[in-house]
Image (tube, coloured by chain):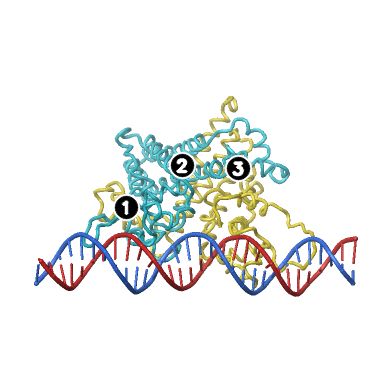
Chain colours: A cyan, B yellow, C red, D blue
Amino acid sequence: MATSGDSQANAVALLWEQPGAPRRGPRPTLTLDAIARAGIAIADADGLAAVTMQRVAAALDVTKMALYRYVPGKDELVALMTDTALGEPPRPGEFSPGDWRAQLDGLAHWLFEQFWAHPWALEATVGARAIGPNELTWLEHVVAALAGSGLRGGEVLDVAATLAGHVRTVAQQGRALAGDGGAEQHLGLAYTALVSGREDRFPALAALLADATEHADGQDQALDFGLNRILDGIALLIDARTQQPPAQQG
Amino acid sequence: MATSGDSQANAVALLWEQPGAPRRGPRPTLTLDAIARAGIAIADADGLAAVTMQRVAAALDVTKMALYRYVPGKDELVALMTDTALGEPPRPGEFSPGDWRAQLDGLAHWLFEQFWAHPWALEATVGARAIGPNELTWLEHVVAALAGSGLRGGEVLDVAATLAGHVRTVAQQGRALAGDGGAEQHLGLAYTALVSGREDRFPALAALLADATEHADGQDQALDFGLNRILDGIALLIDARTQQPPAQQG
DNA sequence: CGGATACGGTGTACCATAGACACAGTTCCG
DNA sequence: CGGAACTGTGTCTATGGTACACCGTATCCG
């Protein structure tokens, strides 16, 4: 399992190729989808570290070496799991046509739900990685929502990145707390434990925590708060663009 | 190396405890800082996967088991590396006092530089993890910048999360391209390769890419673009708050 | 219809890695 | 000066990813 190498290229091929089939020899017992789902079940239950070739194979009643007939290696298996777990994003254009803000909001919430349901997907999508069909479809919908907004191409991609980044962060922070110990319900409490006894070193934080612990807002609020700030900022730009000669050369 | 367990608690202790010393027995050959720096050098050069106890130990001319006298395990070593690599954030209040926007902008850029210089830190900071002193200091500065802005405590933390999330995302996307193959200079090119031949499935994306490939904006622009949108959105909220009876009970 | 040919699953093996444990050398305290 | 605390080392185990040879099976071609 190498982080480097061209496992990325292999993963791309695996994620994008059709299951179209030259049939010869014995019928395969497994399918890529079944393998992915077995891995997802393990990762959902016990985390990404618990996903070993051995365990996935055992869940499918084959030996681990059998898996290598379907996936080139573990990296590619994880990439496959990730895109499968994501699932196909909804088409927000059908529900709120013309309302880019509602569409982006919906897409962000959907993405959050996926990361929330499969927190290991956060770990699986750091560093250089292959982009799967479902992930690209999500991006397609974001781009479609912003078509005709007056934003330039690069800007649209940047908007998508900003949205995805925020969703990831909130999902991660929520899971970092609810995930392992399960004891701490709010990020503030984790900070409070660290700041406590070091108020001289973190005065602003200490003051904030002393005042904020009562009306703790959960991760839902954290998602919407940042999301609304980001969408406000985008709206500002779009408004500026649509009231001017569109997009001066630059 | 277990992702689960209470390695988090151990890491917290390791990151926060003073090197204060009961001295007896032979003088230690190493220091936590030297170990962290050896690990950082390896991770910078060959990625996080290349950081093994063996290799870190070899770089310090000891056996790998000697490291276990200093760190409880590899997870804790990585946590230590991460906070050490981050380094102490600058105090933006000294340079632009009273200007929260300039301060947040500076803090975000600083964080981006750290992640850019140590891309493995992105991988090291997913999932449940311990928060180190430098990371908390960064948060302290963000909170200090927003003190007196009229934002509520939870909202301030959410702002910090949004900023950090955006920085992480941009750093990650930039590295995902520049990192491994080094061939692709812009995210758009990676997308183009995938969309190409599937224009029917990704029409909006295809149109965007066809039009946007020339004026490609690098990761610097991606950072500033999203950052400005986020800061615009925050400014909107702050303005609204400061022009009204401050913070109706929520 | 019968081999050739591909293909799928298995068993065995190898290597790298994280970590446990007992031991031996070293320094300080009383 | 003797023991206690501490440091680095050598050895060992378990686990995980993956290569390879083998054998059985289903399909294709003549």
Q: Position of A199 compared to B219: left or right?
A: right
Quadrant containing the N terminus of chain A in the rendered view: bottom left
B136, A180: nearer the viewer? A180
User: Which residue does the numbered mark 1 point to in the structure image?
Assistant: B209
As displayed, is residue B148 above or below residue B224? above
Image depth: mark 3 or mark 1 in front: 1
Which residue is found at the position 40% from the left and 48% from the top?
A155
| Residue depth check, mark 2 versus mark 3: number of the one nearer the observer | 2
Residue B249 lies, with reference to residue C23, above or below; the image says above
- The amino acid beneath tag 3 is Asp
Residue A103: image quadrant is top left
Q: Position of residue B217 (x, y in %)?
A: 41, 55
Identify which residue is drawn at 60% across, 44% down. Answer: B142
Mark 3 residue crowding within 10 angstroms, few (<14) / some (14–19) / many (20+): few
| Residue A22 visible in the snapshot | no
Distance from disc 3 to disc 1, alpha carbons, whole Å, reads: 38 Å
- The residue where tag 2 is placed is A116
Q: Which residue is mark 3?
A: B99
- Tell me where residue B247 appears, x and y as whole percent: 59, 28
Mark 3 or mark 1, earlier in chain? 3
Chain bearing mark 3: B
Callout 3 and callout 1 share a chain: yes
